[in-house]
């Protein structure tokens, strides 16, 4: 074992080392900034094999000679091949370039390292988080009894919302044995809803048949008539409909379910209404706020600031209309959050409302951002990418090489390359077109030219651009589209027999 003399830059952050720590953070931030400024593309095209060997070759039992050496090593192992979301040709998933004030805040919240479980670990941090929860709930319109909590992401927010819905339903059906009621609970979600709803149902011990998938229209919006029929059918079968999950901003099309109509159904059938606005929450500060009309009637709402508020991961919250429902996650421990805390201070500990115990002060990033840029500043960024998606789709519709799935609502564009002379039809031809689109996506990725996503509609492959960089221009997006068109055409021409025999297109 190696023994090392500690220097201020390699020891714990204390009063003695605070200055040296600030220098180390500044140097590290500079190295990251240089990598970001110098990134020639969104990705190097590296594959897991060679990079994995470099990572595996590091002997973690033998430290480097200090911070400068750590940075040199990390430049090679991480920064050289990172996927850069700020790059104009990163157009793939729901990852955004991050607001500068939020990045600065990250350094502060990590240094102070508050933990948002109890007042005696967080003090003012807790008040800042609560203020942001209140502000967001007000923007949603949830009313005077609203509350909520920051979470690690949309997945956790959806889980917590469904836990509350489950326990409210179990309380309503307390006359039945708990196991029986648990087996009978039903949650309704659209076919375009996020998969975390299914996972949440599993984690919550519901029946494997608990999530009833309600079909959508061609634009991926939940069909309200189908919802009503599904609820009635489950009731007739003796099951217990307990919640409906509406999505405000589906992952593929950015579609927004008919929230007001769903709220009417929820009211009529006594369902908890959860709105997953992980993606669409940016509309709360945009000039398109009206698109969220009806969200104010939800019982709970997921908002992912790390998607459309340009926050670094993680930054999300779950909001509830009635703060009393948060009691379902409260468990008291004498060593942490005894009931006297709330009595003495008139303010509950944040841990009482959270699935986590130790919890980062992610709220500080949003606070910095709102105070430095204002909500309108953030909303303008989101509006810009929504406009960009509309212009991109407009161009694609005029380009005979491509087909657009649906007019974008938010900032995604789903489209595919199609051959210029539709010389074929049938399964083999379709497989060849699908393979050409997949091949185009893989080709731009492995060449480090661009990062784009893909999805399936009725079993067929489509390409997807998720536009979250307000500095990306239409010209830059169309350059990527041209690259995709060229690659797809080559893949299509190169592969007729390969596809027919089930082999992959290169
Ligand atoms: C609609 C929707 N809900 C929830 C999530 C999950 O969010 P997270 O990745 O922050 O857990 C996503 C992620 O893309 C999403 O698109």
Image (cartoon, rainbow, N blue to C red):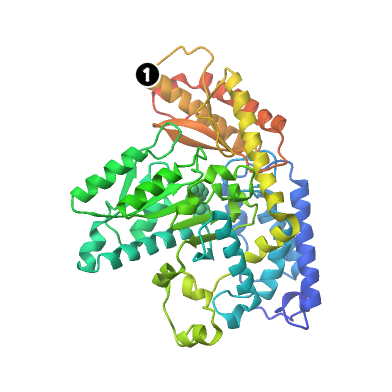
Q: Quadrant of the N terminus?
A: bottom right
Reading the image, the residue beneath label 1 is 426
User: Front-most of 355 and 4?
Assistant: 355
Image coordinates for residue 188, horizontal then vertical, percent: 34, 49
Q: Is 93 placed above or below 186 here?
A: above
Image coordinates for residue 251, horizontal then vertical, percent: 50, 43
User: Residue at coordinates 65% horizontally, 41% vertically from top-left?
Assistant: 383
Q: Is 131 placed above or below 240 here?
A: below
User: Residue at coordinates 34% horizontally, 65% vertically from top-left?
Assistant: 168
Image coordinates for residue 303, horizontal then vertical, percent: 54, 55
User: Is residue 37 at least partly visible in the picture?
Assistant: yes
User: Residue at coordinates 36% horizontally, 52% vertically from top-left?
Assistant: 267
User: Is residue 103 at least partly visible in the picture?
Assistant: no
At label 1, counting other C-alpha atoms closer than 10 Å, the crowd grade (few under 14, some 14-19, many 20 or more) is few
User: Residue at coordinates 56% horizontally, 84% vertically from top-left?
Assistant: 345
User: Front-most of 230 and 464?
Assistant: 230
């Amino acid at each position: 074992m190696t023994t090392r003399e500690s220097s201020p830059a390699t020891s714990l952050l204390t009063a003695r080392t605070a200055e040296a720590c600030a220098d180390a953070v500044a140097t590290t931030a500079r190295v990251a900034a240089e990598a970001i400024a110098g990134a020639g593309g969104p990705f190097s095209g590296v594959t897991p094999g060679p990079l994995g060997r470099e990572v595996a070759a590091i002997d973690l039992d033998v430290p480097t000679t200090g911070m400068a050496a750590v940075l040199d090593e990390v430049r090679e192992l991480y920064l050289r091949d990172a996927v850069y979301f700020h790059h104009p040709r990163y157009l793939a998933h729901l990852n955004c370039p991050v607001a500068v004030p939020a990045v600065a805040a990250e350094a502060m919240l990590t240094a102070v390292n508050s933990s948002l479980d109890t007042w005696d670990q967080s003090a003012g941090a807790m008040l800042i988080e609560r203020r942001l929860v209140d502000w967001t709930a007000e923007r949603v319109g949830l009313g005077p009894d609203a509350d909520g909590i920051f979470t690690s992401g949309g997945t956790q927010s959806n889980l917590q919302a469904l836990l509350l819905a489950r326990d409210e339903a179990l309380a309503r059906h307390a006359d039945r044995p708990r196991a029986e009621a648990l087996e009978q609970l039903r949650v309704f979600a659209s076919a375009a809803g996020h998969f975390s709803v299914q996972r949440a149902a599993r984690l919550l011990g519901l029946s494997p048949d608990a999530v009833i998938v309600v079909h959508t229209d061609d634009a991926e919006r939940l069909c309200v008539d189908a919802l009503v029929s599904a609820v009635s059918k489950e009731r007739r079968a003796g099951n217990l409909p307990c919640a409906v999950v509406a999505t405000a901003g589906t992952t593929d099309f950015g579609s927004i379910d008919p929230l007001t109509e769903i709220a009417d159904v929820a009211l009529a059938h006594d369902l908890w209404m959860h709105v997953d606005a992980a993606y669409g929450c940016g509309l709360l500060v945009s000039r398109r706020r009206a698109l969220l009309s009806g969200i104010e009637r939800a019982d709970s709402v997921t908002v992912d600031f790390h998607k459309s508020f340009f926050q670094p991961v993680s930054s999300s919250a779950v909001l509830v209309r009635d703060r009393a429902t948060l009691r379902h996650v409260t468990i008291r421990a004498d060593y942490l959050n005894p009931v006297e805390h709330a009595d003495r201070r008139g303010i509950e500990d944040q841990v009482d409302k959270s699935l986590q115990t130790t919890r980062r002060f992610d709220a500080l990033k949003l606070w910095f951002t709102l105070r430095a840029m204002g909500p309108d500043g953030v909303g303008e960024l989101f509006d810009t990418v929504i406009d960009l998606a509309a212009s991109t789709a407009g161009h694609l519709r005029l380009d005979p090489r491509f087909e657009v799935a649906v007019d974008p609502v938010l900032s995604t564009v789903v489209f595919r390359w199609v051959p210029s002379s539709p010389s074929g039809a049938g399964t083999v031809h379709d497989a060849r077109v699908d393979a050409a689109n997949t091949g185009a996506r893989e080709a731009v990725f492995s060449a480090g030219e661009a990062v784009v996503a893909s999805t399936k509609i009725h079993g067929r492959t489509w390409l997807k651009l998720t536009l979250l960089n307000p500095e990306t221009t239409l010209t830059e997006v169309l350059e990527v589209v041209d690259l995709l068109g060229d690659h797809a055409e080559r893949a299509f021409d190169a592969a007729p027999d390969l596809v027919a025999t089930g082999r992959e297109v290169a």
